[in-house]
Amino acid sequence: MSFSEPAAELWDAYDESFRKVDEVTLVRPGPIPEGLFHLFCDIIVKHTDGSYLLMQRDSSKYFFPGMWEATAGGSAIQNETPLECAIRELREETGIQSDRLTELGQFRNKDTFFVQFLCVTDCGKDSIVLQPGETMAYRWAKRDELLAMKDELVLERLQYYLENI
């Protein structure tokens, strides 16, 4: 099986205080210089009936192929705010169109600022649209089932939010 490399994108650079560094543009794929960060947004989708949307990553993905995620999400492109990124990624990866997202929190690792959002929706549960090359399946899971999948989900960093929403 061959895995596809991430496509080239232009990203804004941020300093350790999450301030945009105007004179620097990051190019993906490529290294992120030490002391700089890029922006990544995750969106947890909760249906009004209490279930959560799980998306299965495409088997051709470079990172975590075929694994399940309790989010939609991705990197912000140049000049995109966290909310704009979250709205775009939610639409691209699930087909859900909503600008009613609630920020749950932020944190950073060695080269990435992560901003987590929650989208509560009453969309038709069969209306999810998969994004070719990104997602290959979806399903809805109740909270207990989702929490029991702790070791099967890609995004360990979201456990705190999943346990507290």
Image: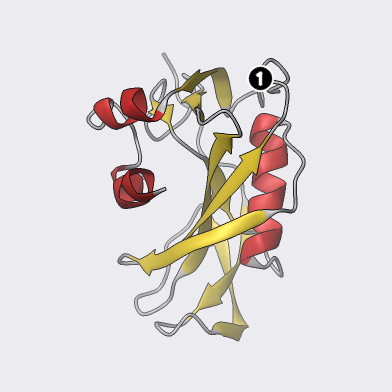
| Screen quadrant of the N terminus | top left
Assign a secondary structure to mark 1.
Answer: loop
137 vs 143, left or right, is right
Please give the count of numbered marks on the rendered protein.
1
The location of residue 41, given as percent across then percent down, is 53, 55
Residue at image position (61%, 46%) is 119
Above-or-below relation of 33 to 94: below
Please identify the quarter of the rendering in which residue 142 is found.
Answer: top left
Whether residue 114 is visible, yes or no, is no
Query: Residue 116: image x %, image y %?
Result: 48, 56
Height in image: 140 above or below 118?
above
Q: Where is residue 150 in the image (x, y as percent from the top left)?
A: 25, 32
Reply above or below: 32 against 67: below
Q: Please report the residue visible at 66 percent of the width from the left and 27 percent of the height from the top.
A: 131
Residue lying at 71% horizontally and 48% vertically, measured from the top left: 88
Q: Which of 17 and 121 is in front in this view?
A: 121
Left or right: 34 with respect to 104?
A: left
Q: Mark 1 points at which residue?
A: 125
Residue 151 can be seen in this image:
yes
